[in-house]
Image (cartoon, rainbow, N blue to C red):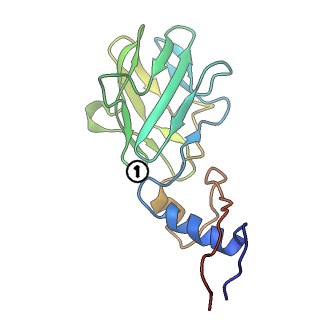
Amino acid sequence: MCIQSRRGCACGALALWLGAALLPGAAAAANIQPNGFAWSENAGWINFAPNAGPGVSVGDTAVNGFAWSENLGWVNFAPLGSSGVVNDQHGNLYGYAWGENAGWINFAPNGVPVGIDSGGVFSGFAWGENVGWINFNAAPGVVTTWRALDLIFANGFDVLPSSLPLASIDYVFVGAGP
């Protein structure tokens, strides 16, 4: 049945949204939850969700934004002239962040990447020549609302994270409907 309306029905919007969500790169980037800290013996706490400044955002293919450390200043996750920190769409982080006082920070030292588990919790270690090891296993930790699509739909249609927006679509049917 074709309903002529300016505002789409919830079923149509949900079907369109689910179709878009299954496309590569469709998961929305999500901010790090408040109090997202990693620890470095040489640099102290590194805040991934600072009160002032942009913070860090995880997406399907990249990590963007800035983390803050009292001892390092701003750490850029997508510096110009570099691929920055990349996400392999499964929560494995590779590449380099840059800080003026930190230098390059490797997110996959010795080939072992920093990871994001199915709950959005970062784990593992990054390495910077000027800062040493950065520990993502230290409490309170770094947590994101980003989830890999293969984790979201691993057991069928699990509950979707709140970071994936529902859309409202305005449209007009043209022509006669069945």
Residue farthest along the bottom direction in this orientation:
178
Amino acid type, callout 1: Gln
Relative image position of residue 144 (x, y in whole percent): 58, 41
Q: In this view, does 99 lie to the left or right of 169?
A: left
Q: In this view, does 136 lie above or below 134?
A: below
Look at 43% across and 27% down and name the residue there.
Answer: 77
Q: What element carries label 1?
A: loop
- Residue 50 is at least partly visible in this image: yes
Which is more toward the observer, 148 or 171?
A: 171
Q: Is residue 132 left or right of residue 73?
A: left
- Residue 45 is at least partly visible in this image: no
Tell me how many marks there are. Answer: 1
Relative image position of residue 117 (x, y in whole percent): 50, 49
Q: Is residue 84 above or below residue 52?
A: below
Look at 66% across and 84% down and name the residue there.
Answer: 2
Which quarter shows the C terminus? bottom right
Relative image position of residue 100 (x, y in whole percent): 41, 9
Residue farthest along the front direction in this orientation:
175
Look at 65% across and 36% down and name the residue there.
Answer: 33
Which quarter shows the N terminus? bottom right
Relative image position of residue 154 (x, y in whole percent): 49, 67
Few, some or many residues within 10 Å of mark 1 (<14, 14–19, 20+):
some
Q: Residue under circle 1?
A: 89
